[in-house]
Amino acid sequence: MMSTTQNLLKELTEESVVTSKMLQRIPADQQNWQPHEKSMSVNKLAGHIAELPGWISMILQTEGLNFADQAYTSPVWNTDSELLAILEKSLAEAKAALENAKEEDLLPIWTLKHGDQVLMSKTKGEFIRHSMSQIVHHRAQLGVYLRLLDVPLPGSYGPSADDPNF
């Protein structure tokens, strides 16, 4: 039977294949496009997706994050290779952290705050799982962006209309 950390590592590895395929589809001339004024641009959304695996190592190494102490800025990238390098770096950090983590490392509480306001407080294991859900969530958002830009979508958990052979 696999441990929780081994299961998380397996899921992260599987999801990273789909994430990489999706990020590779971004048209260079559409990085500043956004579907709505309240939406992130393609560039910011893709950068966020690429960096999200790095949250796993941050969660395991810290007790929490306070956005009031550290304003969020999306990673800067201009080319596909720069974007994929961000993804590969964050994946390598996450995988190393999970490979070195023990089951008891997933039990302490990790808190996400903005100033004195607690946004979420969960065990580190729950927050890691939440971060992985965020990757999938934002990747699906990017899929909608790409569909609106008429970019063929790769299959993810099976075939897509553009990738019937998956």
Image (cartoon, rainbow, N blue to C red):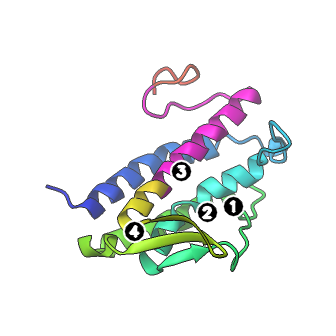
Q: Amino acid at mark 1?
A: Glu
- The mark found on residue 157 in the picture is none
In 3D space, how far apart are the residues under numbered discs 2 and 3 (Cα atoms)? 16 Å
Give residue 158's position: percent from left, percent from top.
43, 28
Q: Amino acid at mark 4?
A: Lys
Question: Of residues 108 and 115, which is closer to you in this image?
Answer: 115
In 3D space, how far apart are the residues under numbered discs 1 and 4 (Cα atoms)? 30 Å
Task: Assign a secondary structure to mark 4.
Answer: helix
Magenta residue span: 131-158
Give residue 117's position: percent from left, percent from top.
62, 70
Q: Residues within 10 Å of mark 3 (few under 14, many from 20)?
A: many
Q: Residues within 10 Å of mark 2 (few under 14, many from 20)?
A: some
Check contact, mark 1 vs mark 2: CB within 8 A. Answer: yes
Residue 89 is left or right of residue 9, and the answer is right
Give residue 61's position: percent from left, percent from top.
45, 80
What residue is pinned by disc 2?
85
What residue is pinned by disc 1?
82
User: What residue sits 60% from the left and 62% below the top?
Assistant: 51
Compare marks 3 and 4 and give the one earlier in the sequence.
Answer: 4
Task: Assign a secondary structure to mark 3.
Answer: helix
What residue is pinned by disc 3?
135
Give residue 149's position: percent from left, percent from top.
77, 30
**Where 83 falls versus 157 (above or below)?**
below
Compare marks 1 and 3 and give the one earlier in the sequence.
Answer: 1
**Where 55 falls versus 28 (above or below)?**
below
